[in-house]
Image: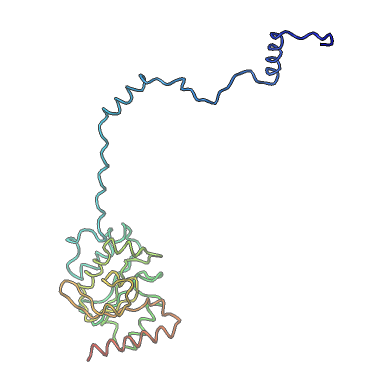
Amino acid sequence: MNGAVQPLLADQFVAALAWWRDAGVDSDFSDAPVQWLADEAADAPVVAAEAAAPARTAAPAAPPAEPIGGPRAQWPATLVEFAGWWLSEPQLDGGAVHGRVAPRGHAGAELMVVVAQPEAGDSEHLLSGPEGRLLDGFLAAACIAPEQVYCAAALPRHTPLPDWVGLASGGLGDVLAHHIALVAPQRLLVFGTTILPLLGNVPTQSAKDLPSFYHDGMTIPMLGAFEIGAMLGRPRAKARFWQRWLDWTGNQNA
């Protein structure tokens, strides 16, 4: 062929390898996986050891948390004892006792007023701020003397954004019911829609759906209302509450 000398096949093969080596390819690859280290005999002891291991047992359940206020058998049996217990019992508020405010009044009061919690500025006197002044004005208009009223809070101290659902499941309603039973008032006025579920009112119901408080054979006429703070600066809200009060007390006197 035109006098050209054809290279030998061996020379062509060596030249091809040299070309690919210069291109950086010096190994043969395959896409098929190969288990180079598989050893069934070595895996057998591990399987046997796992089979011989004792079965794992579930961790023991945590003991139930103590209810709010601790064991009911240790709750105070008289209202005189209750005030000191309210200020000092650690399990009333997760161990915190600082900032608690005592209730005020006497047993058998003509009216027991229950609010959700003390005001932010309360220290020695429950409801010492604007909510207390609005309550005092209402009581004066209703011709009820201060000494005829027992004032209490569902919580022992001011607590921003309390978990009412958790408090209810923890037994706060039982503590409040016990408190009311010790006071044994003639009538019960509850300010706060968050308190009514603690006393047995379904949250979807209105305050009118629970006209009485029942506890251990005791029945006390009860009026539920919105929080006192919600009526501050709202004349219409105060007027509506006043009308409900007149209707309620009128029904009681009939």
Q: Which residue sits furthest front?
A: 1
Q: Which residue sits furthest right?
A: 2
Q: Position of residue 254 (x, y in %)?
A: 22, 91
Q: Is residue 42 above or below residue 241?
A: above
Q: Quadrant of the N terminus?
A: top right
Instruction: Identify the residue at horizontal 33%, vertical 72% (top origin).
Output: 204
- Left or right: residue 17 versus residue 203 is right
Q: Position of residue 250 (x, y in %)?
A: 27, 90
- Left or right: residue 137 versus residue 2 is left
Q: Position of residue 69 (x, y in %)?
A: 25, 61
Q: Position of residue 200 (x, y in %)?
A: 26, 71
Q: How many marks?
A: 0
Q: Which residue sits furthest bottom?
A: 254
Q: Nearer the viewer, residue 57 or 149?
A: 57
User: Quarter of the image holding residue 44?
Assistant: top left
Instruction: Identify the residue at horizontal 39%, vertical 81% (top origin).
Output: 134
Instruction: Identify the residue at horizontal 20%, vertical 58% (top origin).
Output: 71
Q: Is residue 59 above or below residue 39?
A: below
